[in-house]
Amino acid sequence: MKLDESSRGPALRKLMKSRLGRLFEWPKPDVEKTVGPYEPDIFDFFDKERALLEEHFHTLLAGLSDENIDVLADPRTPNSNRLKIQWNSVHCSDISKLKRAEPPWYAGGFGVANYRADFRYWSQMPEFTLNEALLLSLGIEPKHFSDDEIEKLQSEMERGANLWKPMEYLLARRKQMARQFPTYGRGRKISPLELFAWIEQVKLDVHPEFNSKYLTARPQKAPELETVRLDHREKTSMLQLIVTMAVGGYGYEPGKPRSQTPKEIENDAAELGIEVSAETVRKYLRSSESQISADWRSPKS
């Protein structure tokens, strides 16, 4: 059976996904520097190893005939088929090893957008459990770690298990907070006043957006950039300059969800002695996208 490109391509993707599972086109977390350990290279290293294994499968499939591809992709082909047995045995140990080595979302740091706390919501809470206060101080939405999960991690560490650095950091902070706010069962709650008073007293490094509307006043971190009032024309010109330099100089692709441009600009600014976070850069880049014509298309697309 002869497969044209429109049918061979999907068949190859189906076969790749059937063997690699979640490793196929693995979405590398986009992590920003916030609180605690920051090692985004962990994700880069794993993705490099994953891409290498994926390339091996691409090469193997490229050498198969259309007839063989059709046999392997056909769900009616029995598992006893010799070709299917051979296909299912290729790189089995490599796949298993890589799946075991897959880093969890927090391995490179806590600043992953999909796990970011809803600070506006939590700022309206009149009290926090110990673990809510712990996770919010690190910028994590509490629903992503149950009390039982944290207790399990604590037990594993006490038994000598090797944990990712961010988890060691989280558990060390939990120990600090548990001593400051001794719990009497899981019903114990901490008021924002006592929590933030302690944070200020010991100068605890917490996520800059963690705050509470129940505080009469809390010293704010100095803004990263001096606030400058611009008229509409000046603001428009500034945004046009930003998007022009980002697209032309950094290859920024407007609308791309995991662009590395903000991090690149943060690093270049640091070399000039300018302190500006990738999150701030991303905010201005998103604002500047409104200056691009709706029918403009990136040459990369």
Image (cartoon, rainbow, N blue to C red):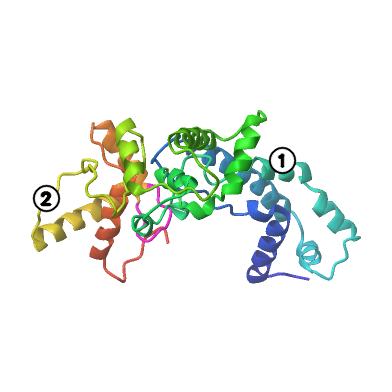
Q: Which residue is mark 2?
A: 228
Q: Are marks 1 and 2 in contact (CB under 8 Å)?
A: no
Lower position in the chain sequence, tag 1 or tag 2: 1
Q: Which residue is mark 1?
A: 97
Q: Is residue 268 magenta?
A: no
Residue in the image at 63% along x and 42% along y: 152
In the rendered structure, the answer to whether residue 261 lies left or right of residue 71 reads left
Of 139 and 254, which appears nearest the observer?
139
Residue 62 in the image: x percent, y percent?
A: 70, 55
Q: Quadrant of the C terminus?
A: bottom left
In the rendered structure, the answer to whether residue 192 lies left or right of residue 145 reads left
Q: Is residue 187 visible?
A: yes
Q: Quadrant of the N terminus?
A: bottom right
In the rendered structure, the answer to whether residue 159 lies left or right of residue 256 reads right
Q: Is residue 258 magenta?
A: yes
Task: Please name the amino acid that badge 1 sits on.
Answer: Lys
* 40 shown above or below 239: above
| Residue at disc 1, secondary structure | helix
Instruction: Give the foreground label among 1 and 2.
Output: 2
The overriding secondary structure of the stretch rendered in magenta is: loop
Residue 254 in the image: x percent, y percent?
A: 34, 59
Residue in the image at 19% along x and 44% along y: 225
| Residue at disc 2, secondary structure | loop
Q: Is residue 49 visible?
A: no
* 206 shown above or below 145: above
The stretch in magenta equals 252-260
Residue sitting at the far top: 160
